[in-house]
Image (cartoon, rainbow, N blue to C red):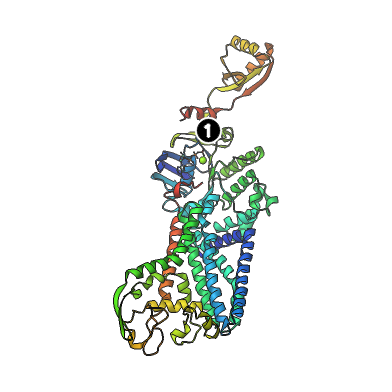
Amino acid sequence: MTLSGIRTMARQEFRVRLRTGRWRTALMVWTSVIGLFSLLLWSALQWLGVTSSIGVTMFSTLMLFVLSLALLVMPATSAQSVNGDRERGTLASVQVTRLTAADIAIGKFAAAWGTGLVALALTTPFAGWAVLEGGVGWLRALAVLAVVALLIGVVCAVSLAASAVFPRTTTSALAAYLAVFALSFGTLIAFLLASALTAETVQRTYGERTVETRVPQTHRVWGWLAPNPYVILADAVPSAIPAGPAGYVLGFEAGRASQYAVVGPVIDPMEWIRNGVRGLRVPPADDYGAYGEYTPYGDAVAIDPRTGEAEDGGPVWPYGLAFNVALGAGALWITVRRLRTPMEEPPGGTRIA
Amino acid sequence: MPERPPAIVARGIQRAFGRVQALRGVDLTVPYGEVTALVGPNGAGKTTLLLILATLLMHDDGGVSVAGHDPVEDPGAVRAKIGWMPDSFGVYDQLTTDEYLTFFADAYRLPAAAAARRIAELLELVHLTEYRHQPVHVLSRGQKQRLGVARSLVHEPEILLLDEPASGLDPRSRVELRDLLRGLAADGAAVLVSSHILAELSEMADRVVFVADGVTAGEHRLDELTPATHRWRIQARDPDDLAEALSAFGVTATEAGGGHEVELDGDDAAADLLADLVTDGVRVTAFTPLGRTLEDAYLDLTDDRR
Ligand SMILES: Nc1ncnc2c1ncn2[C@@H]1O[C@H](COP(=O)(O)OP(=O)(O)OP(=O)(O)O)[C@@H](O)[C@H]1O
Ligand SMILES: [Mg+2]
């Protein structure tokens, strides 16, 4: 593996990608969709009469949207990279050159990630707009972009591995989408099911009354949520909101949303995810009655008796990010192995040439 | 000067794909400085053998050495020395001919200046210079094939493995390919070329290796194959006249292909027979030598085709 080998392969892939007219259209559509979303979001906030820190709301929502769109689009760009080349009959000719399997795999990965980063770069004007609306520090903005960039890389690596493992391009695309689905929704489903299994009977006193309830011990299974890209993004970036009473910041009780939206503090979807997930790490309090409080979360969150704030169970993102980086690295390793020649078996009944 | 060891030595190579035993013991020697033809029926295992030699596929059993290296143990060393052209290959969309070759020059780690010079030279060689800035995918099949030849030569390999390089080429390009390969062999390269066009191979190759059903059925020098007797096909305005005259001269003839085929002891005997026939008043319209030695050997070999 050499740097020049990787560069040769990446340059080639990048050129082939950008040459096809389809790509220019795709990037244009991508930019328009994000532009339109920003505009609609801004208008909606204006219409609602949100006054406080509109930038925070915009930025947070926009970047979650960008992440969603990236998770949707990235598999399509790289899930046919290796087996597509095999089908077109261009891979074997490259494999007999002095480029090694690692050169080819990492070069392809770099080109795919690079394309994703170009797409991400195209969203910066809109992210910048949100930042200019105020309330979001540049550091936070950069952190968000960096985490999204990293997650895009992970999805690219996983998609590339799918294209190296499966002989047919349709199968590999499906596999890549399943992987993204598993990360975004599978983790949530697994967490919900797992936390149901942890439920224990607990006695609770609400003022005068003592009630027996089944309480899920989420602090034992929060790990299932850690690999979720939305959780990582929301949890990893520094909070935009100065600490305040939890019930207030998160005061989103049914029927009162609009009231809070207008007069209340900052609406920040990332903050909701972040607080929600960190709250899951806190063991449920034995006795709520002593503080006479009941949180909008129901049972999941305990209130710290000293500060009156939701207890913070500690960050989740380091685990999630570590998991995802390991996943990406593992995917690259599989890709390299699958590209190694001489091959023992041609993949799934295909011919090499 | 001591004799250079052969470029390729393969002994008892076996390779199975699932339950299909594609190669069941192939022996092959390819010396430097000569063109070796690889001939055999469809499915004989020629492409599979070339894939193994080109470091793309592992063999199950047997021993291989290419350019003095084991393609499994040290594929990198082998790759630096070989040029491989598959029987069917794709080209990247949207790249120009020039960019396509430049990519491969980079992939073979040629310095940029040397690469540019080499590519100009190769484009000239395969007559694609005027298509230098054309996208690769608009080239015709034969032009693509010629581009493939150029690609396999980018790094000036000493060993060439070509899988049916002549398919899709027009007659002039075939002659040029033949001359090109002969020239490379004359310069000391080892050329192994598979093809089904036997007439052409017999003009191009020094040696021929027959592969049938996954085993080497024969390794010959081409001049060994040339038998003492040659065959001619004779046609005349009146075939009966011809048959009568031939039997009168005591020449055994077999009717075939709208004429009579005879076996004669070389060119002098042929010239004599023609003169005799004409003197005898047979109106001869064609007197064709049948350069079918390779084809004969091939047909003998594959008599029992499944
Ligand atoms: N990847 C593969 N999977 C399964 N079987 C294969 C594979 N590649 C080749 N074979 C089988 O191996 C045998 C030899 O195939 P190969 O392509 O080497 O023949 P060939 O001599 O090149 O034929 P042709 O003259 O038609 O090009 C055939 O029976 C073929 O079906
Ligand atoms: Mg073949």
Q: Amino acid at mark 1?
A: Leu
* Residue A97 image offset from top left, x and y in percent: 52, 54
* Residue B81 image offset from top left, x and y in percent: 51, 51
Q: In this view of the protein, which residue sits in the foreground, B50 or A198? A: A198
From this viewpoint, is residue B231 visible? yes
Secondary structure of the residue carrying numbered label 1: helix
Q: In this view of the protein, which residue sits in the foreground, B281 or A162? A: A162
- Up the image or down, A3 lies above or below B257; here it is below
What is the total number of numbered labels drawn onto the structure image?
Answer: 1
- Up the image or down, B293 lies above or below A243; here it is above
From this viewpoint, is residue A332 visible? no
Which residue is painted at 59% across and 48% down in the image? B148
Q: Is residue B77 left or right of residue B200?
A: left
- Up the image or down, B171 lies above or below A156; here it is above
The residue where tag 1 is placed is: B222
Place residue A73 in its image quadrant: bottom right
Report in which chain the residue with disc 1 lies: B
- Up the image or down, B9 lies above or below B305; here it is below
* Residue A37 image offset from top left, x and y in percent: 60, 71
* Residue B75 image offset from top left, x and y in percent: 45, 53
